[in-house]
Image (cartoon, rainbow, N blue to C red):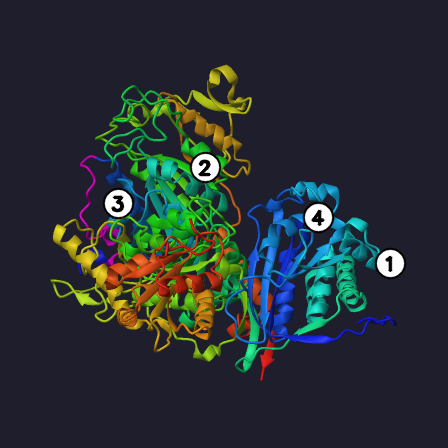
């Protein structure tokens, strides 16, 4: 990289893994820096898990605590499941980032500071009375003070770039420095800069120069000493890519269109953290995908239901507040029994809550949040890449059973990334369905007729006859339908029957879904039951517990309605059953009422995923006989 | 099957087997008949390619009575649902049916956006100036002072003019008709059907139970000559038994005048194709008083790109630029690496 003659001879140390947290002002490009480090690490073959955390404000006042944006990445030479409990390294681009993130850093950890941002004004903005570099508050940490802004400007001095623009490349300096420290491949970042900014050669040159300068600084400055290597993790052979949950969800929707041989329609209204699915899908119109940015959440769902009536594989994507608005349309879809997939990227609530933070508190909303008896399948993804498969699964259920289906993911899955062993496309399920094209019965006079509510005896799905099909013209609607004929009907017995039929159709789906995921330890007294994005944290906790001599079994749910058919058996026979959830205890109430077992909640509602340590502590507390207050250590509320 | 069921030129062909359940004497019957008769006259339509989508309200029962495809959906949401259907299936004739409460109150947002997008849906707004299905509350088109169950001291809400609202939303087709004149309804519905894009047709419809005679002062046979203004494209707007009155633009507002006072040259020459919607807006304002002469016919029929066609064009363009979608290639479209 550099031709510097006085290169410092650094030794190389090998690490099993490292947790790095990039933090800076919202305008400092920390999410981009984290993304690039992630991609380079993925290409280097590490296993990795990321946790992007950014404020709801697009540009909170510069230099304030409210404006701090952070990106945590855990890279490892072995299989890992969480973004890590405590970072080993904190890169802080300004005093606010240092102040807001320091308490997360592990004791004795490394801090890399952009000293150019540590002036009186920035210190005051975030409430530092004294410079933390001088008042002893960083004692016990390894602190590297680097004038990143100045070095970036120096590196770009020969380029035709204004100083102000050059300063904006300082995140690439930081990226270059950390890339040197952890021996990341450089070419992917150069390639990415060229691809991303190719239209603006000055920006390419400036970013490249800053990136190189950061790398060279690490190599030549004597302050850093050793370079670290994190070897590639043993992984199954195959082709990998790095994927976030939202992109995986969008690709799953495209895949479901291909696998069902139906055109895809997405009706959606922008909402954090779901909008990226709309953005991603809008790039794939060459698959025949129609994306419609509606005037509101209701029209997002309504337009999708209209497209479903027309024979499209229809989706609406949203987050919790949007699900509330779509409720009436979802119930109509339940009444007229058409396929509609509602994807809820959960976030902190109630109300606007914490739009950019994760939570899993919409489970009850998904299961019960509608007027009337309105049962429908609810499924949940457990990792970023699993969003791909669950989008296909939700589509399969919707199409096969002619029902609305809710797919739950959350902000952590949506924005978090992991390496993904690409599936062999030929192994993905065929989810195609047949439209009705012919009469399906005869009337009292022996004339052939089409009865839109005459169900398939096996699936109980009604026929899907789309406009354009001659002879099968029929009317659907929100008024109660007569069994078989689908005519408007207010008869009490018929309403009772139809209510039972809709429930029985849902219940029957249990025969057609896989068992729950089980990570079993034969001797375990402890059972952890999870759903959704807690999978990684629970897996990491169970691994650690076993090392510590506490065997534990982990059962994880992807299907929440109907529940996995084997769940009733799986949950029996444990002394301690704990259900960690990023809510106040929703699945646990279902487990208790369905299976009459003494399951205990472990709640965390802080906009953050569980750390493995929080789950381990809850297990240890339960097994040691101490009474549990049912809240994670730092999540009590 | 009976012969009628096989002959598209017979009204029975377009009639479903469901018993019509509007109140006896309701204006909706006449509108339904006009639509069914229109379909007996059209030769570019098929039962299976026609869909009626409705919201909630008395008018919204309409789809059950047509023998086409149909959906009786949610209060206010029919334009949104129909938009999705029309975008997904541009091969279909999609009609939307709803009342003044459905379209202008709970569904006002969907209405204006469907109109501005110019989606190829034909919206029939049955305006009876009252909530009928909920048994008589004032609506967004009820006149100020109206005494209803929810306004015992009289309504204090200023009403919408649906025509002006549609013009404000940039609608490319706006028309008004009324339930007592089948021929006029058929003509206007046919024009809407022929229009490429979103059409709004306001239909003055009598609710003989909760707001009987709301339009009598205008549409009763003996009132029509002086109170109904026929809009004829390319002609000066005149009305009255002796065609002695007319409409002129005065400081940006449409005004009814005696031709004797202003001279024939001062009259507004009706032009359906004027791109700027402000004249339609002004003509819509003439109907804001129940006792003022009211324009009927096609206010506006403007050529503009239709939404679903534009969506289709983008799909084709994407296909040209990137080639047909390939799932295998999509999964490998980011940075990838191989583990051996």
Classify B153 as above or below B78: above
Nearer to us of marks 1 and 3 is: 1
Q: Give the left or right position of residue B147, taking residue B112 as reference.
A: left
Q: Which residue is mark 1?
A: A158
> Which labelled disc corresponds to residue B61?
3
Q: CA distance from mark 2 to mark 4?
A: 67 Å
Q: Quadrant of the N terminus of chain A?
A: bottom right
What residue range appears in magenta? B6-25
Q: Which residue is mark 4?
A: A135
Label 1 with label 3: CB-CB less than 8 Å: no
B31 or B118: nearer the viewer: B118
Numbered marks: total: 4
Report in which chain the residue with disc 2 lies.
B
- Mark 2 lies on a secondary structure that is helix
Report in which chain the residue with disc 4 lies.
A
Q: Is circle 2 on the same chain as circle 4? A: no
Q: Give the left or right position of residue B105, taking residue A547 as reference.
A: left
Label 2 with label 1: CB-CB less than 8 Å: no
Report in which chain the residue with disc 1 lies.
A
- Mark 4 lies on a secondary structure that is loop
């Amino acid at each position: 990289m550099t031709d510097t003659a006085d290169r410092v001879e650094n030794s190389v140390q090998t690490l099993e893994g490292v947790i790095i947290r990039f933090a800076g002002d919202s305008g400092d490009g920390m999410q981009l820096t984290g993304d690039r480090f992630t991609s380079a690490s993925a290409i280097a073959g590490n296993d990795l898990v990321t946790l992007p955390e950014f404020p709801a404000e697009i540009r909170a006042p510069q230099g304030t605590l409210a404006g701090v944006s952070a990106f945590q990445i855990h890279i490892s030479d072995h299989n890992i499941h969480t973004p890590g409990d405590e970072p080993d390294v904190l890169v802080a681009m300004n005093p606010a980032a240092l102040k807001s993130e320091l308490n997360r850093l592990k004791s004795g950890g490394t801090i890399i500071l952009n000293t150019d941002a540590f002036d009186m004004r920035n210190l005051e903005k975030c409430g530092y009375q004294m410079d933390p570099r001088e008042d002893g508050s960083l004692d016990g940490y390894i602190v590297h003070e680097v004038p990143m802004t100045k070095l970036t400007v120096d590196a770009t001095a020969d380029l035709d770039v204004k100083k102000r623009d050059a300063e904006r490349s300082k995140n690439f300096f930081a990226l270059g420095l950390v890339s040197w420290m952890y021996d990341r491949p450089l070419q992917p970042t150069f390639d990415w800069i060229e691809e991303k900014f190719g239209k603006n050669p000055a920006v390419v040159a400036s970013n490249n120069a800053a990136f190189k300068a950061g790398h060279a600084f690490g190599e030549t400055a004597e302050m850093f000493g050793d370079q670290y290597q994190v070897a590639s993790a043993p992984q199954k052979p195959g082709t990998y890519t790095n994927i976030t949950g939202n992109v995986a969800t969008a690709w799953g929707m495209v895949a479901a269109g291909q696998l069902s041989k139906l055109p895809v329609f997405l009706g959606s209204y922008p909402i954090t953290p779901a909008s990226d699915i709309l953005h991603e899908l809008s790039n794939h119109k060459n698959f025949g995908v129609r994306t419609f940015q509606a005037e509101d959440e209701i029209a997002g769902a309504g337009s999708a239901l209209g497209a479903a009536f027309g024979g499209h594989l229809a989706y609406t994507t949203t987050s919790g507040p949007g699900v509330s608005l779509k409720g009436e349309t979802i119930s109509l879809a339940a009444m007229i029994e058409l396929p509609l997939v509602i994807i809820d990227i959960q976030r902190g609530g109630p109300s606007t809550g914490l739009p950019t933070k994760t939570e899993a508190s919409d489970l009850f909303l998904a299961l019960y949040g509608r007027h009337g008896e309105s049962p429908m399948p609810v499924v949940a993804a457990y990792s970023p890449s699993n969003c791909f498969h669950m989008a296909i699964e939700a589509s399969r259920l919707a199409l096969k059973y002619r029902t609305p289906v809710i797919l739950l993911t959350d902000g952590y899955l949506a924005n978090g990334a992991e390496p993904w062993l690409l599936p062999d496309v030929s192994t993905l399920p065929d989810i195609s369905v047949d439209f009705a094209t012919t009469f399906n019965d005869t009337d009292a006079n022996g004339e052939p007729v089409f009865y839109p509510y005459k169900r398939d005896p096996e699936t109980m799905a009604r026929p899907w006859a789309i406009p354009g099909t001659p002879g099968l013209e029929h009317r659907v609607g929100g008024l109660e339908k007569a069994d078989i004929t689908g005519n408007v009907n207010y008869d009490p017995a018929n309403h009772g029957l139809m209510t039972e039929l809709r429930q029985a159709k849902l219940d029957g789906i249990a025969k057609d879904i896989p068992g729950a995921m089980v990570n079993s330890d034969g001797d375990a007294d402890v059972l952890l039951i999870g759903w959704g994005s807690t999978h990684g944290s629970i897996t990491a906790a169970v691994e650690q517990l076993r090392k510590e001599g506490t065997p534990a079994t982990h059962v994880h749910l992807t299907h929440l309605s109907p529940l996995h058919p084997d769940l009733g058996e799986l949950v029996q026979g444990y002394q301690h059953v704990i259900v960690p959830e990023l809510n106040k205890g929703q699945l646990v109430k279902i487990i208790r009422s369905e299976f009459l077992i003494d399951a205990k909640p472990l709640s965390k509602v802080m906009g953050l995923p569980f750390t493995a340590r929080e789950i381990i502590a809850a297990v240890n507390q339960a097994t040691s006989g101490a009474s549990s207050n049912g809240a994670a250590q730092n999540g009590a509320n | 099957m009976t012969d009628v069921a096989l002959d598209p030129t017979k009204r029975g062909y377009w009639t479903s087997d469901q018993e019509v359940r509007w109140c006896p004497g309701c204006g909706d019957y006449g509108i339904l008949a006009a639509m069914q008769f229109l379909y007996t006259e059209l030769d570019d339509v098929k039962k299976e390619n026609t869909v009626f989508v409705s919201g909630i309200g008395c008018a919204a029962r309409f789809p059950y009575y047509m023998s086409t495809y149909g959906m009786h959906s949610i209060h206010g949401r029919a334009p949104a649902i129909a938009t999705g259907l029309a975008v997904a299936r541009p091969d279909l004739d999609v009609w939307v049916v709803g009342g003044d409460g459905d379209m202008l109150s709970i569904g006002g947002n969907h209405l204006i956006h469907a109109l501005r997008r110019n989606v190829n849906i034909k919206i029939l707004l049955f305006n009876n100036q009252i909530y009928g299905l909920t048994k008589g509350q004032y609506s967004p088109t009820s006149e100020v002072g109206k005494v209803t169950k929810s306004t015992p001291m009289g309504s204090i809400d200023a009403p919408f003019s649906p025509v002006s609202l549609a013009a404000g939303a940039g609608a490319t087709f706006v028309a008004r008709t009324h339930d007592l004149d089948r021929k006029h309804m058929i003509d206007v519905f046919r024009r809407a059907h022929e229009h490429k894009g979103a059409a709004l047709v306001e239909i003055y419809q009598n609710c003989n139970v909760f707001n009987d005679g709301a339009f009598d002062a205008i549409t009763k046979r003996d009132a029509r000559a002086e109170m109904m203004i026929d809009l004829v494209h390319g002609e000066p707007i005149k009305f009255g038994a002796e065609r002695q009155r007319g409409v002129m633009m005065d400081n940006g507002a449409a005004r009814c005048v005696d031709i004797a006072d202003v001279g024939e040259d001062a009259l507004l020459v009706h032009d359906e194709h004027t791109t700027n919607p402000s004249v339609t807006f002004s003509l819509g304002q003439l109907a804001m008083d129940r006792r003022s002469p009211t324009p009927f016919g096609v206010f506006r029929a403007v050529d503009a790109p239709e939404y679903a066609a534009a969506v289709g064009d983008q799909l084709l363009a994407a296909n040209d630029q990137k080639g047909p979608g390939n799932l295998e290639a999509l999964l490998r479209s980011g940075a990838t690496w191989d583990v051996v």
